Image: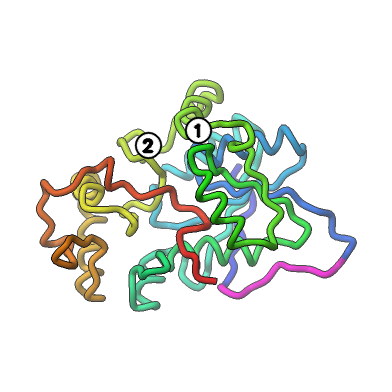
């Protein structure tokens, strides 16, 4: 029920100059509550749409269950595309790039999501994104960085916030929210998002100790810590388990604006 899976290497293009190709409506499905609601609204508005998921293997495996439930309830198939060069893995990106993040953001988003979207899109597409009304700034940043995209933000247009999306998915559609939400995370990013702070990573330490250890080892190998304080880098293997606030230190939802490098 998840539909077709397509693998693409970085740099592959699906652009076409054939004027006979029909315009598409592509809704970018992230396995988050907001993108699920945006996809349903897009289907109501446009009728025939494509829901497309950029698979990142470091997300929780329950996301695949969520896709199945979403398709079963709504009848909307979700196509999965994966970056073949990196096997959809953030760790492959970090190791091959030799860094985790810099002043521009995290390269995992650029390579595994943004570049995949650009390879898939056509000039005539209408692209639907699940930015909520409390993410207007992120939507504006996306518009500024992607002047070639005909975008639609149905959640902002309908003044829908993130909490309302949770209720719509759970109570109206009757779909159990993904595990990461049920564990108290405010987003459905990778297990161990490099945009998170100390409190967030201390929660990952408790909920997913193997993932915590894996990122800690990567930090030492690349000599870069995802967390910092006034004194400089704070490596995960030396992070005080009591430091930080898991709510305040949570990363934003991973979308198409984390890595702003062109």
In the picture, the quarter occupied by the N terminus is top right
Colour style of the rendered protein structure: rainbow
Q: Nearer the viewer, residue 91 or 161?
A: 161
Q: Is residue 63 left or right of residue 131?
A: left
Q: Secondary structure at mark 2?
A: helix
The quadrant holding residue 176 is top left
Q: Is residue 43 left or right of residue 209?
A: right
Residue under the image location 55 percent in, 22 percent down: 172
In the picture, the quarter occupied by the C terminus is bottom right
Q: Which residue is mark 2?
A: 181
Query: How far from the left and from the top, in percent, is residue 29?
Result: 57, 46
Residue under the image location 59 percent in, 38 percent down: 156
230 vs 180: above or below: below
Magenta span contains residue 33: no
45 vs 223: above or below: above
Q: Nearer the viewer, residue 247 or 171?
A: 247
Find the residue positioned furthest to the top. 171
What is the C-alpha distance between the residues marked 1 and 2? 15 Å
Q: Main secondary structure of the magenta part?
A: loop
Query: How far from the left and from the top, in percent, is residue 118?
Result: 63, 65
Residue under the image location 41 percent in, 42 percent down: 62
Earlier in the chain: of badge 1 and badge 2, it is 1
Residue 161 circle label: 1
**Residue span colored magenta:** 10-18
Q: Is residue 127 left or right of residue 210?
A: right
Magenta span contains residue 14: yes
Query: How far from the left and from the top, in percent, is residue 200?
Result: 25, 48
Q: Residues within 10 Å of mark 2 (few under 14, many from 20)?
A: some
């Amino acid at each position: 029920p998840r539909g077709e899976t397509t693998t693409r290497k970085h740099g592959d293009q699906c652009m076409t100059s054939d004027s006979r190709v029909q315009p598409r409506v592509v809704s970018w499905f992230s396995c988050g509550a907001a993108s699920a609601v945006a996809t349903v609204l897009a289907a109501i508005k446009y009728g025939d749409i494509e829901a497309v998921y950029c698979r990142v293997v470091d997300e929780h495996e329950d996301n695949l269950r969520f896709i199945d439930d979403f398709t079963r309830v709504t009848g909307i198939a979700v196509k999965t595309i994966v970056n073949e060069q990196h096997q959809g893995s953030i760790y492959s990106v970090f190791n091959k790039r030799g860094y985790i993040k810099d002043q521009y953001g995290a390269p995992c988003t650029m390579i595994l999501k943004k570049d995949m979207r650009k390879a898939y899109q056509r000039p005539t597409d209408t692209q639907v994104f699940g930015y909520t009304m409390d993410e207007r700034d992120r939507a504006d940043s996306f518009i500024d960085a992607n002047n070639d995209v005909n975008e639609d933000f149905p959640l902002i247009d309908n003044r829908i916030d993130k909490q309302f999306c949770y209720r719509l998915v759970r109570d109206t559609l009757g779909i159990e929210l993904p595990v990461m939400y049920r564990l108290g995370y405010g987003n459905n990013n990778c297990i161990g998002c490099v945009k998170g702070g100390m409190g967030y990573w201390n929660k990952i330490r408790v909920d997913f100790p193997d993932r915590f250890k894996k990122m800690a080892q990567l930090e030492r190998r690349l000599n870069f810590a995802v967390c910092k304080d006034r004194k400089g880098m704070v490596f995960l293997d030396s992070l005080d388990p009591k430091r930080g606030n898991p709510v305040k230190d949570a990363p934003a939802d991973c979308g198409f604006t984390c890595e702003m490098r062109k």
